Image: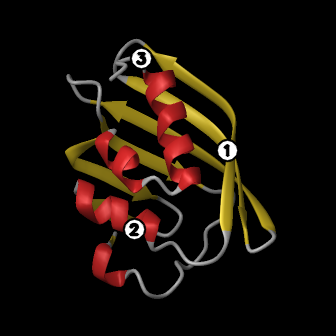
Amino acid sequence: MSTRPAEVIAAFWAAANARDWTTFGSLLAQDVVYELPQTRERVRGREAYVRFNAEYPGDWTLEPVRIVGAGARHGASWTRFLVDGTEQTGLCFFDFDEAGLIARLHDFWPTPYEPPPGREHLTERF
């Protein structure tokens, strides 16, 4: 596996868009933490975070606009996310562990919103 953040982030988004959850999960640390500040949701652990994405409602696609990496431990992406015909812009900041796996993500969306129903079993509100 590449330990360069920009390459790992590109592989992460490609796997998500392809619904390749095995590859997607292989890029994550076992104890990964994912946070959405706008909805105040946090997902802990690889299995829960893979399910969170696999079960995301609606017909969606995403396109990375820009991906950057800093050293071996940090990176960020700007994405266009299209869900059920509505486009959103996302900014995601990534932290990596010593093995080059994604350990923490902070995912920012343009405006606060209430999360879609049906994923409460995978998240905690903060």
Q: Nearer the viewer, residue 102 or 39?
A: 102
- Name the amino acid, label 2: Phe
User: Residue 25, percent across and down?
Assistant: 32, 49
User: Residue 123, percent across and down?
Assistant: 32, 73
Q: Residues within 10 Å of mark 3 (few under 14, many from 20)?
A: some
Q: Is residue 33 left or right of residue 11?
A: left
Q: Is residue 113 left or right of residue 85?
A: left
Looking at the image, residue 55 lies above or below residue 46:
below
Name the quarter where the N terminus is drawn: top left
Q: Residue at x 38, y 44 (%)?
A: 23
Mark 2 or mark 1: whose residue is earlier in sequence: 2
User: Residue 66, percent across and down?
Assistant: 68, 30
State the residue lying farthest toward the bottom.
117
Give the distance between the C-alpha atoms of the residues marked 2 and 3, in whole angstroms.
25 Å
Q: Secondary structure at mark 3?
A: loop
The image quarter containing residue 2 is top left
Mark 3 or mark 1: whose residue is earlier in sequence: 3
Residue that numbered label 1 is attached to: 79
Mark 2 or mark 3: whose residue is earlier in sequence: 3
The image quarter containing residue 63 is top right
Q: Nearer the viewer, residue 41 or 99?
A: 99
The numbered dot on residue 52 is 2
Q: Nearer the viewer, residue 29 or 109?
A: 29
Q: Residue at x 56, y 42 (%)?
A: 14
Q: Residues within 10 Å of mark 1 (few under 14, many from 20)?
A: some
Residue 40 visible in image: no
User: Which of the colour schemes (rainbow, by chain, secondary structure, one colour) is used?
Assistant: secondary structure
The numbered dot on residue 4 is 3
